[in-house]
Image (spheres, rainbow, N blue to C red):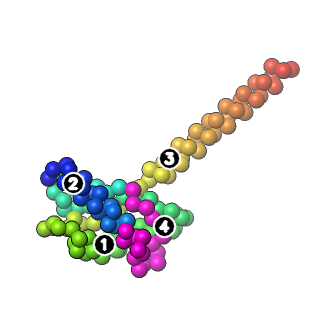
Amino acid sequence: MSDVRVRKLQEFIKQEVSQMLMRGLKDPRIGFTTITDVHVTGDLREATIYVSLFGSDKEKQDTLIALQHAAGHIRTELGKVLRLRHIPEISFDKDTSLDYSMHIESLLNEIKKDEHTRDASSEDDTSN
């Protein structure tokens, strides 16, 4: 398949599934979720939807499980609007980029704090 077609399909799936989540699926385990990316294989048979999950670790896990259970329903709904012979199999995966960026930010803040403490202590040493 052409890269342009795959990218268009990825963006379309991202928009449609985002709208489904905003309208609300009936599973109460699904918490606040943002779709960050969609990856469709070149043969258009499989689609992995990456989601940012918010809440406690238990809420995140419950949301991911609920999304996996809803994958069949989501695929059926996509089939109603996609004009493809085969609708891709849907799977969900956690997007960890937000957690990773928060971790990097906390490390940078620690370094900044250590440098500030070191600078303050060296100023005290030179004033004596």
Closer-to-camera residue (83/103): 83
Amino acid on which the number 4 mark rests in the picture: Phe
Q: Which residues are magenta?
A: 19-36
Residue displayed at 33% across by 61% down: 14
- Tell me the quarter of the picture where residue 89 sits: bottom left
Asked whether disc 3 touches disc 2, contact meaning CB atoms under 8 Å apart, the reply is no
- Circle 2 sits on which residue? 6
- Circle 4 sits on which residue? 32
Q: Position of residue 128 (x, y in %)?
A: 86, 20
Left or right side of 7 for 20: right
Left or right side of 43 for 77: right
Q: Position of residue 69 (x, y in %)?
A: 35, 74
Amino acid on which the number 3 mark rests in the picture: Ser
Secondary element at image label 3: helix
- Circle 3 sits on which residue? 101
Choose mark 3 or mark 1, whichever is in front: 1
Closer-to-camera residue (37/29): 37
Res. 71 in view: yes
